[in-house]
Image (cartoon, rainbow, N blue to C red):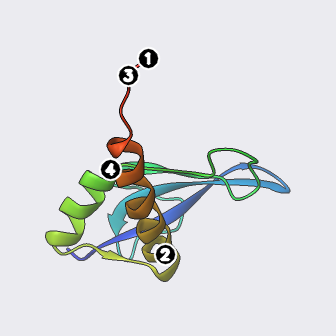
Amino acid sequence: MALKIKLSRAGAAHNPSYRIVVSEARAPRDGRFVETLGTYSPKAKTEQLRLNVERATYWIENGAVPTDTVRSLYKKAKKQAPAETAAPAEA
């Protein structure tokens, strides 16, 4: 069973949002999936991308192949994640 990390379409007409999912390579775009890793809303003003980087890394290390779009989103999320965790949460 070959796995891919790909986008699954959700949302309304002219207002797309996508789930980033791990699914079988031959499964339809909006078909069955193994796990949801996050969301991507290209038209959103704030928080366009939410991705569980740890789980995505786990799946990639275990053989799941990300699509080109998901690969670029994964790189973007990895850059954002250290900046968010490095900031002290003191008030």
- Say which mark, if any, is on residue 35: 4
The C terminus lies in which quarter of the figure? top left
Element under disc 3: loop
Q: The disc labelled 2 sits on which kind of residue?
A: Ser
- In the image, 50: left or right of 46? left
Image height check: is 53 above or below 28?
Answer: above
The residue singled out by tag 1 in the image is 91
Q: How crowded is mark 4: few (under 14 residues within 10 Å), some or many (20 or more)?
A: few
Q: Which of marks 2 and 3 is in front?
A: 3
Q: Which of marks 1 and 2 is in front?
A: 1
Residue 5 location, x and y as percent? 37, 68
Q: The disc labelled 4 sits on which kind of residue?
A: Glu
**Chain-order first, disc 4 or disc 2:** 4
Q: Which residue lies furthest to the left in this view?
A: 62
Query: Is there a contact, CB below 8 Å, between mark 1 and mark 2?
Result: no
Name which residue lies at 48% across and 59% down. 31
Q: The disc labelled 1 sits on which kind of residue?
A: Ala
Element under disc 4: strand
- Say which mark, if any, is on residue 90: 3
Element under disc 1: loop
Q: Which residue lies furthest to the right in this view?
A: 14
Q: Residue furthest front?
A: 91
The residue singled out by tag 2 in the image is 72
